Amino acid sequence: MEKWYLMTAVVLLGLTVRWTVSLNSYSGAGKPPMFGDYEAQRHWQEITFNLPIKQWYFNSSDNNLQYWGLDYPPLTAYHSLLCAYVAQFINPDWIALHSSRGYESQAHKLFMRATVLIADLLIYIPAVVLHCCCLKEISTKKKIANALCILLYPGLILIDYGHFQIVLLDGFMQDFILLFFCVMTWFKVAIESCHAPC
C-alpha cells in the first residue's frame, strides 16, 4: 500500500485519543466497597497470580466470588495472570492476596492503563491495519478512512480507556476475531492467486 505515512498518522491519532481518554477518572474510583471495574481488573490479577488455576472460578476463603469473581473466559484470566507477573515485578503490593483489596494509586492506574494500551499495540492496532490493507478493490484513501473509523470508534475507546472495562475483556476478543478474519482473507487471496490462470 502506498502512502504508509497516512496510515502511520492514523495509528498515532488513535493512540493519542486513547491515552487522552485514559487520563480521566474511571467508574468506581474511590468508592468502596467494590471500587468499580478498575478493582475488578486488579482483583483478577490478584486471584490469578496467587491461586492455582483450579481455584480461579470457584468460591473459597481466598476467592470470594461475590467480590469481583472471575467471570470471563480463561483467555481473559491468562491475560490477567500475565499482567500480574509484571505487576509483581513492579510492586507486589498491587496484587497481594487479600491485603490489596481496593488498592488505588496513580502509579497503579498508570500501570493498568498501560496494559490496555500495550494490548492494543500488540493485537488490535496491527489487526486493524492488516484488515484495512487487505481490503481488495478499494482505493488507498478508502483503506485509510476505514482504519481511521475503526481506530477512533468511540464505543471501544470509552469502554476500554474511560470506564475501565479493559480491552482484554471486550476488545481483546474482538482483536482476535479481527485478526482471524485478516488471516482468513490472506489465505483466501493466497489460494486464489495459486489457482489463477497463467
Image (cartoon, rainbow, N blue to C red):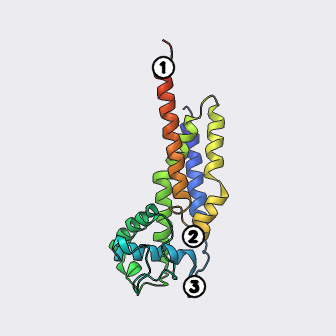
Q: Which residue type does callout 1 highlight?
A: His
The residue indicated by pointer 2 is 164
Mark 1, other Cα within 10 Å: few <14 / some 14–19 / many ≥20 = few
Q: Residue type at mark 3?
A: Gly
Q: Earlier in the sequence, mark 2 or mark 3?
A: 3
Q: CA distance from mark 2 to mark 3?
A: 14 Å
In the rendered image of this protein, does residue 136 appear above or below residue 77?
Answer: above
Real-space CA distance between mark 1 and mark 2, rounded to the nearest whole angstrom: 47 Å
Q: Where is mark 1, residue-wise?
A: 195
Q: Nearer the viewer, mark 1 or mark 2?
A: 1
User: Which x, y percent locates residue 127?
Assistant: 51, 46
Seen at 61% across and 44% down, the residue is 147
- Which SS class for mark 2? loop
Q: Secondary structure at mark 1?
A: loop
Spatial separation of the CA atoms under disc 3 and disc 1:
61 Å
Q: Earlier in the sequence, mark 3 or mark 1?
A: 3
